[in-house]
Amino acid sequence: MSKPKVLVVGSLNIDMVLEIERMPEVGENLFVEKFSMLPGGKGNNQAVACARLGALVSMIGKVGDDEFGERLLVNLEQENVDLAFVTRQPLVNTGLAFIFVDKRGENRLLVAPGANMELSVNDLDNALQLFKVNEFLILQLEIPQEVVKKCIEYAHRFGMRVVLNPAPAQPFPVEILTANDIITPNKYEAEVLSGVEIRSLSDAIKAIQILDRRCPARKVITLGGEGAVASYDEGRFVYLPAREIKVEDTTASGDAFNAGLLVGIGMGKDWIGALQLANNAAAIACTKVGAQSALPHLRDVERLIEKIGEGEVKIISGS
């Protein structure tokens, strides 16, 4: 079986993870129970996640000319990600994310984007060869939108399939996506894109239907502990309940889901099979604290499936 060839254009951060009993109230001081400093950033995480699941991965991005940037470059090399076009930006700090994780595994994030916002169309032009030789492009919104839009333009020019993870939540012209592409918001991002307040599965389906009027790309809305719902065929949707696992930290679950979906498709799985691979990868990522430290290898997903099966799938009518 040939390995999927994936290009990731996106953010690279150092994650400052603070494990706490609960989120503090306004004006309240709490002690941190554990502190960790780890490689992160949604682009970086998704590149590593795809590589661990068996894809051949290249990345375009920026880090600062500092110690944090050096750590991220070394980490990409260790994770077998081609980093030839991850460049260092002088006089700018590397992106930093401050992640608060409580005892329930819920998290809150603050991000100082730093060098990530210096990524430009010129950087894409310098790396144009990567758009010509890869099959898939995976994108997020932690870099300038003009760069994301140009990436999609280049991907379509060279016949690549685009997976857009529109995170963090912000408006985006999804109309530029095609029927060959996929968009994967969580429920908060889907609310921003669709205008639908999502409080139930039926709300999520309504959001997909509204987004269908704007673009033909396949949609997947991840719903955290409620699983995920996705486009299927005319008038029907796929619902995948969350796997029953002990949740430690949900930080990396979305990145693992996106990587699993793309790699599943690249491995030749049908739509439902790829969604199941994504759902299982996301579940494993919830069982450990941190972002990249929690991302599974393909063997981890295979072991989970051997133990508890691929997971339940429900086909739902949208009428």
Image (tube, grey):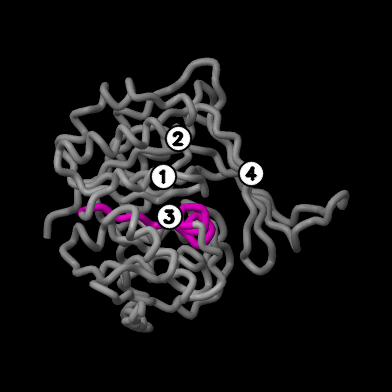
**What range is drawn magenta here?**
180-194
Question: Taking 278 as reference, is 157 above or below it?
Answer: above
Residue type, mark 1 in image: Gln
Question: Taking 86 as reference, is 314 above or below it?
Answer: below
Q: Position of residue 31 (x, y in %)?
A: 81, 53
Mark 4 vs mark 2, foreground winner is 2
N-terminal of the pair, mark 1 or mark 3, is: 1
Residue at 46% across, 20% down? 89
Which quadrant: the C terminus?
bottom left
Residue 135 shows up from this direction: yes
Whole-Å distance between the Cαs marked 4 and 1? 17 Å
Mark 2 vs mark 3, foreground winner is 2
Q: Position of residue 267 (x, y in %)?
A: 18, 61
Dot 1: element:
loop
Residue 183 forms part of the magenta stretch? yes
Q: Is residue 187 left or right of residue 23?
A: left
Residue at 30% across, 63% down? 298
Which quadrant holds residue 239?
A: bottom left
Dot 3: element:
helix
Mark 1 vs mark 3, foreground winner is 1
Residue receiving disc 3: 255
Residue type, mark 4 in image: Leu
Residue receiving disc 2: 143
Marks 2 and 4: in contact by CB < 8 Å? no
Marks 2 and 1: in contact by CB < 8 Å? yes
N-terminal of the pair, mark 4 or mark 1, is: 4
N-terminal of the pair, mark 4 or mark 2, is: 4
Q: Position of residue 24 (x, y in %)?
A: 80, 56
Marks 3 and 4: in contact by CB < 8 Å? no
